[in-house]
Image: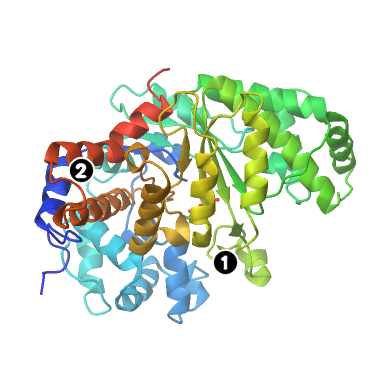
Amino acid sequence: MKPFMDENFLLSNKTAERLYHEYAANEPIIDYHCHLSPQEIWENRSYDNLTQVWLYGDHYKWRAMRANGVEERLVTGGEGVGDYERFAAFAAAVPKTIGNPLYHWSHLELRRYFGVNEILNEANAPVIWEKVNAKLRQPEGFRVRDLIVKSNVEVICTTDDPADTLEYHLKIKQLEDFKVQVLPSYRPDKALEINRATFLPWIGRLEQAVGRKVADYEGLLSALEERAEFFHETGCRVSDHALDVMGYADATREEAAAIFAKALAGNAVTDEEERKYKTHTLLFLGRIYSRLGWSMQLHINAARNNNSRMFDRLGPDTGYDSIGDSAVGGPLVRLLDAWEKDGELPRTIVYSLNPTHLYVLGSAIGSFQGGGIPGKMQLGSAWWFNDTRDGMLEQLRALANLGLLGRFVGMLTDSRSFLSYTRHEYFRRILCNLIGEWAENGEVPGDMELLGGLVKDICYGNAKRYFGFDAQ
Ligand SMILES: O=C[C@H](O)[C@@H](O)[C@@H](O)[C@H](O)C(=O)O
């Protein structure tokens, strides 16, 4: 039996071991999509205890706790509930998470950041709590920026609304002693979600950001463009869209303007009107991304906020989402083609939360490669419910079968925790194991320079060249 999580964790053969230790492990991290708070980076937040790091914002852990029968007050907190009680409830759930990536993530985090090699459970929870907290409370070494630097991170792209001031990104840039690039990503979901309760209040925020009234559709588009320019000046090179349901409907500028006017007057719009408005506005935005040389991420098919009782109580991103199954192939191809035919298709990364769409997406993007840009169209890394060992393998295999694995821009954390950089380690081990297996089976040459170069590119080099974060 192999020891649990030793240095060759997930590496099942000699080639995989060499690929990981000699080529992958020391590559820097370009985390081109996450949900970290730039404010916490600027403030260099410190933590009093492990619950603050682990349980204050991690909906993956919350789901596991609920499934283990833990009461909600211990999951997301409640009157009179202490941080230790919450940690103990999580620790008791950990042994049940065997087979779930949480089991690996949690133990990797304990090992890599805190040197704790014990296997967490209910019995040793008090000891581990004390050990980790003692480290977290040291004046140096465990604050947010220390964790980032320790993880060998070169770039972090946060997720930001066009109306955001980006004040913390601007401040972080001025730090003399912190050279990691913390850049915004432009995520205009609220501009597109015309039928949601967030729409009108968000228009108000946008008005504040541009300092003028958004009285009509032209006003909206010019405000969105102005914000994109501002994001660009602040170092933004990626946009992101949550397209929970992928739709496409042609619309003229006049039609889109009329639909916007209807929503602005406080009226609901029909499903078809919503599709038209979204398509027209997204096409407009994509042209801006193309002009600015940005990469556009499309996150498709999340079914969000399924549990209305809990949504009313806790809001979004609290662990009540699942995989959507609306069709993506047809609308995606029409959307990409609409940009492509005018020569305005930006670099694009597509993700579907539905793993049955891997081949649909992987083949669709192959129809839009070109323009002399290596890997211009990317099949996004295994996202959220697919961010598992099996999910990553499926994504890597689909990509290799349909396109060019050697041009893949690799992994991201998509995370809300500063300890999640171990997810890059997890991915790198899985990648090296896959390629190592191919070599051991004689399916690819056992040429370490060739395979090691491929691994390095996927871990770091491709993302470095693709996003152009340096060209600022
Ligand atoms: O990994 C899961 C995530 O943090 C998830 O909450 C996000 O992917 C988010 O919904 C988004 O839309 O970007």
Q: Give me the residue at 81% from left, 53% from top.
A: 271
CB of mark 2 near ligand 1 (< 8 Å): no
Horizontally, residue 103 falls left or right of residue 308, namely left
- The picture quadrant where one finds residue 141 is top left
Q: Nearer the viewer, residue 289 or 229?
A: 289
Horizontally, residue 262 falls left or right of residue 118, namely right
> Where 163 sits versus 192, above or below?
above
Horizontally, residue 35 falls left or right of residue 196, namely left
Task: Identify the element where label 1 is drawn.
Answer: loop
Contact between labelled residues 1 and 2, with CB atoms less than 8 Å apart:
no
Residue designated by label 1: 320
Q: Position of residue 172 (x, y in %)?
A: 41, 28
Q: Position of residue 92 (x, y in %)?
A: 33, 78
Type of the residue with mark 2:
Ala
> Where 376 sits versus 211, above or below?
below
- The picture quadrant where one finds residue 221 is top right
Type of the residue with mark 1:
Tyr
Task: Identify the element where label 2 is drawn.
Answer: helix
Q: In the rendered image, which quarter contains the C terminus?
A: top left
Horizontally, residue 259 falls left or right of residue 62, namely right
Q: Earlier in the sequence, mark 2 or mark 1?
A: 2
Q: Position of residue 6 (x, y in %)?
A: 12, 62
Q: How is the image coloured?
A: rainbow
Q: Give me the residue at 77% from left, 43% from top.
A: 249
Residue designated by label 2: 24
Label 2 neighbour load within 10 Å: few <14, some 14-19, many 20+? many
Q: Give me the residue at 39% from left, 37% from top.
A: 41
| Residue 1, disc | none
Q: Give me the residue at 60% from left, 37% from top.
A: 161
Label 1 neighbour load within 10 Å: few <14, some 14-19, many 20+? many
